[in-house]
């Protein structure tokens, strides 16, 4: 705060950068600069009366010098270096205040944050069991039909490509082992996850996106309910629990359809195929399929929920989030499948030596 006391009436204040004059009570005249950034108060006292008015906040140095024109004192500006020094910081603050991270960046970070919240809330036991059971029914029993149908036709198509070549080479006894390894290690978990991502993941993203744009999630917060506990955690748990069972059923149906096709079309006995599969399969093959399916379920549910809760732009934004969630989930499934396969199956294999 700057203050000045009247020595001779009237008292004049002058500034070289000013452009407007203000007359107060016929005894004080000052000029106010146009550039106003931060505001402070200048207090002028004349005896008992006290007047306050607003001036721009500028770091200036004032000095009282005699005025040769009228004999009164005038206050002049000696330095304005502070304004010039602060100009750079004002520009930097303005640039950072206008900058926002790309959408794909903060959405990717939201996936990691949401995954951490789900893990922490689950470890603390803060689960909504009723909603979890509803989502488990939605992911599991209601998705069995489309998963089994897809697995059956994928198994038959895969059998056509393998059996005809192996039969020509006289490797009929290796057909069942190759089919069993392919289904258990790769086809069953990946095909099941793709079907679930298209059916359930898109539904998660669309549902949560609609709730976000219609401010229903804010309503849950107002009612004292954590949206992560009520909306996200049940979906993640349901996906991680249901996908291993779906994968196991898809493996069984795929092997059965392959055996029937090989027996009816190529003359390879079902007993030969089953015996070959039994010799080639090991417990770790089934366990690795279960682990893969759990990881894929977590990727589908977390990505879909994260894309849903970060939806903006009304109905158009909901559609874009749904499509993007499915695409990102599929990409994540393929990347995770490569990483897990590289970790689980290293070195030369010997599963077909017993055939």
Image: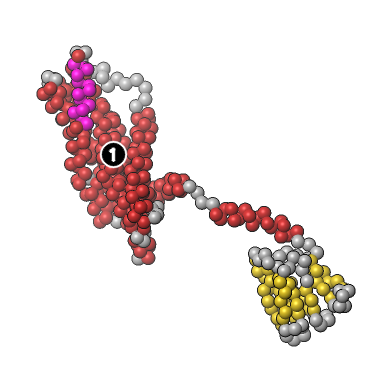
- The image shows residue 113, relative to residue 23, as above or below, that is above
71 vs 58, left or right, is right
Residue at 12% x, 22% y: name it: 265
Name the residue furthest bottom.
48
In the image, the segment drawn in magenta is 154-167
Query: In front: 140, or 71?
Result: 71
The question of residue 289 being in magenta is answered with no
Residue at 25% x, 38% y: name it: 192
The question of residue 156 being in magenta is answered with yes
Rate crowding at label 1 as few (under 14), some (14 to 19) or many (20 or more) other CA atoms within 10 Å: many
Q: Does dot 1 land on a helix, a strand or a loop?
A: helix
Expressed as whole percent of the image width and height from the top left, the position of residue 140 reads 22, 45
139 vs 105, left or right, is left
Query: In front: 203, or 246?
Result: 203
Looking at the rendered image, the quarter that the C terminus falls into is: top left
Expressed as whole percent of the image width and height from the top left, the position of residue 258 reads 17, 27
Name the residue furthest left.
264
According to the picture, the residue beneath numbered tag 1 turns out to be: 193
> Which quadrant holds residue 338?
top left
Expressed as whole percent of the image width and height from the top left, the position of residue 11 reads 80, 79
Residue 295 visible in the picture: no
- The image shows residue 70, relative to residue 182, as above or below, that is below
Expressed as whole percent of the image width and height from the top left, the position of residue 279 reads 21, 22
Residue 146 visible in the picture: yes
The dominant secondary structure in magenta is: helix
40 vs 196, left or right, is right
Residue at 26% x, 27% y: name it: 182
């Amino acid at each position: 705060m700057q203050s000045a006391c009247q020595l001779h009436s009237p008292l004049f204040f002058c500034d070289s950068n000013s452009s407007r004059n203000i007359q107060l009570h016929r005894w004080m005249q000052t000029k106010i600069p146009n550039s106003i950034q931060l505001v402070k108060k200048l207090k002028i006292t004349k005896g008992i009366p006290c007047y306050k008015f607003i001036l721009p906040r500028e770091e200036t140095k004032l000095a009282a010098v005699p005025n040769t024109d009228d004999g009164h004192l005038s206050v002049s500006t000696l330095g304005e270096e502070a304004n010039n020094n602060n100009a750079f910081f004002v520009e930097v603050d303005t640039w950072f205040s206008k900058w926002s991270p790309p959408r794909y960046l903060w959405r990717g970070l939201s996936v990691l944050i949401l995954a951490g919240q789900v893990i922490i809330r689950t470890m603390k036991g803060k689960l909504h069991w009723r909603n979890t059971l509803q989502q488990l029914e939605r992911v599991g029993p209601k998705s069995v039909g489309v998963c089994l149908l897809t697995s059956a036709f994928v198994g038959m198509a895969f059998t056509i490509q393998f059996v005809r070549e192996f039969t020509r080479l006289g490797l009929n006894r290796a057909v069942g082992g190759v089919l069993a390894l392919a289904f258990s290690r790769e086809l069953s978990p990946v095909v099941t996850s793709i079907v679930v991502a298209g059916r359930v993941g898109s539904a998660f993203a669309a549902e949560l996106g609609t709730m976000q744009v219609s401010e229903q999630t804010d309503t849950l917060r107002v009612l004292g309910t954590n949206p992560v506990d009520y909306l996200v955690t049940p979906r993640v748990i349901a996906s991680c629990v249901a996908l291993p069972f779906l994968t196991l059923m898809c493996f069984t149906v795929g092997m059965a359809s392959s055996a029937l096709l090989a027996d009816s079309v190529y003359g390879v006995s079902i007993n030969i195929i089953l015996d070959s599969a039994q010799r080639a399969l090991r417990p770790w093959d089934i366990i690795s399929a279960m682990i893969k399916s759990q990881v894929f379920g977590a990727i589908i549910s977390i990505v879909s929920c994260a894309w849903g809760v970060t939806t903006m732009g009304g109905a158009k934004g909901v559609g874009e989030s749904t499509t993007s969630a499915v695409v990102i989930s599929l990409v994540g499934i393929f990347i995770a499948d490569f990483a897990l396969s590289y970790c689980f199956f290293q070195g030369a294999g010997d599963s077909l030596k017993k055939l």
